[in-house]
Amino acid sequence: MEFGAHVSSSGGIDTAIDRIHALGGDCVQVFTQSPRMWRPTAHAQEAIERFRAKRAEAKIGGVVCHALYLVNLAAPNDTVYDKSVQTMRATVDVARAIEAEAVIFHVGSHLGAGFEAGLERVCTALSQILEHCDGGTWLCMENSAGTGSTIGRSLDELGVLLERLDRHPRLGVCLDSCHLYASGYDVTDPSTVDELVAELDERVGLDRLRALHINDSAAELGSNRDRHANVMEGLMGENLGAFLAHPAFQHLGAYLEVPGENKSGPNADEIRKLRELHARWTG
């Protein structure tokens, strides 16, 4: 298993490698553009080449890109929908250029239009976006924590999307421990994690699980509230190790998205705690 975190790429996308290396990480997740605006960043070819060179020199393993949180592939509003598709395609293009393994994204919300209507919008969008995925870059749906009109809260919903897209060979999933907990999966219990893995294998396929987001939770089990907490500081605490140490996950990259000290993001101490938690549960 590789241990890493989401880090900033401010100052050039290659700086993400500098940051994760300084934190002692093995893998890294980045935004390919500002998370606060739709406009994509025009990355200089030199920065892309530096990213690949630094990655090799620092021996960073997995690289994944996270799509903007603004993206809503189920949006009934055409303007938001079109911007979401364009942004996702641009993100995939950058991911391919830096040779990332995956683009991770939240499916979105139908905002009251209905699950079937939202599903149709999502499948149309993903068909276009998947045309840009080739080589080693996958598109990975992340399970969500939300309630109401959110799509992707369960493995069943992710499985439906996969089937509707004819099980595209580059469509996978990323599991987030905090989102699972918020959705009612008690991933602090080894037997529940076994059941989760069996369900994932049946509905999606273990080969399509490409990454893990490891976050403790500041919200209660089944709350449907997405509130990340630092490792060992949330409600899962030590028992988050039941999820982290499952044998089916040991070939994956584990990416932190925790608040960190003073809400400044993951730091070296968080990665250290993650490694130590893993060691305690696998030792």
Image (cartoon, rainbow, N blue to C red):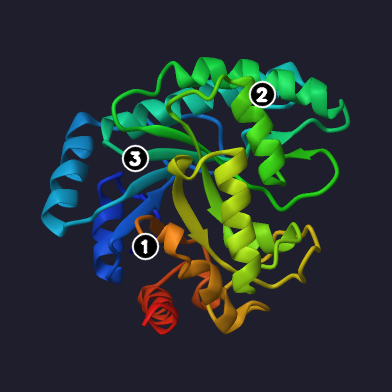
Residue 101 is tagged as 3
Does the image show residue 164? yes
Q: Is residue 236 above or below residue 257?
A: below
**Residue drawn 22% across and 39% down?**
47
Q: How many marks?
A: 3
Q: Amino acid at mark 3?
A: Glu
Which quadrant: the N terminus? Answer: bottom left
Q: Residue 276 location in percent, x, y? A: 39, 82
In-front residue for pair 227/244: 244
Rendered position, 32 above or below 265? above
- In the image, 61 versus 81, the foreground residue is 61
**10 Å crowding of disc 2: few (<14), some (14-19), many (20+):** many
Residue 111 lies in what quarter of the image? top right
Residue 4, x across and y down, in percent? 36, 62
Task: Point out the tag, 2 or 1, that comes first from the N-terminus.
Answer: 1
Image coords of residue 9 (percent x, y): 36, 50
Q: Which residue is mark 2?
A: 122
Q: Which type of secondary structure does the marked residue at label 1 adopt? A: strand
Residue at 66% across, 24% down? 122
Q: Amino acid at mark 1?
A: Gly
Report whether residue 33 is seen.
no
Res. 4 mark = 1
> Which mark is first along the chain, 2 or 3?
3
- Against 222, residue 203 (above or below) is above
